[in-house]
Image (cartoon, rainbow, N blue to C red):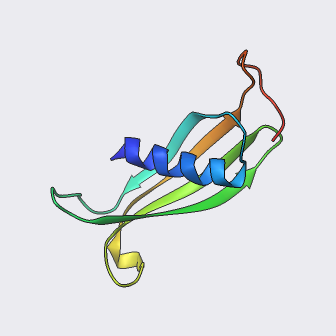
Amino acid sequence: MLKWTDEYAWIAATMDHPGCNLVTIGMDQVRFQKPVREGMIIRFVANRAKTGNSSVQYTIQVYRESEAVMPENLIFSALITFVRLDDKGNKLAL
């Protein structure tokens, strides 16, 4: 589940910053509200939380699938941080 969350956030980040080599440097504030059961259909929602010089953060919320994304359907949320790197692993401005 956390791998999917990281991938979803990475997709959102690369859409906002096309052509940038972005890597995950942190995932924090993971807060599970409800259990995830096998066969459950889930929905991911990504929101940019903060943009720095070479990094960007996204809040990812995972909901039980429903007609509307409602607080009572929240399974968990996480804050994921990406940094832009060059081919040698040095930070670059976004």
Farthest residue, direction top: 88
Left or right: residue 35 compared with residue 57: left
In-front residue for pair 26/20: 20
Tell which residue pokes out farthest to the front in this image: 19
Q: Is residue 79 visible?
A: no
Residue 29: give x, y in percent of width and height: 50, 49
Q: Is residue 83 above or below residue 90?
A: below
At a point 41% along the width and 80% down the height, the residue shown is 70
Give left or right: position of 88 versus 7.
right
Residue 44 seen in render: yes
Residue furthest bottom in the image: 67
Q: Is residue 8 above or below residue 81?
A: below
The relative height of residue 37 versus residue 19 in the rendered view (above or below) is below
Residue pictured at 23% horizontal, 58% vertical: 35
Name the quadrant of the C terminus.
top right
Residue in the picture at 56% in, 45% down: 10
**Is residue 34 found left or right of 18 in the rendered image?**
left
Q: Quadrant of residue 73?
A: bottom left
Q: Position of residue 59 (x, y in %)?
A: 56, 57
Q: Residue furthest left?
A: 38
Marks counted in the figure total 0
Residue 91 at what x, y percent from top left?
A: 77, 26
11 above or below 65? above
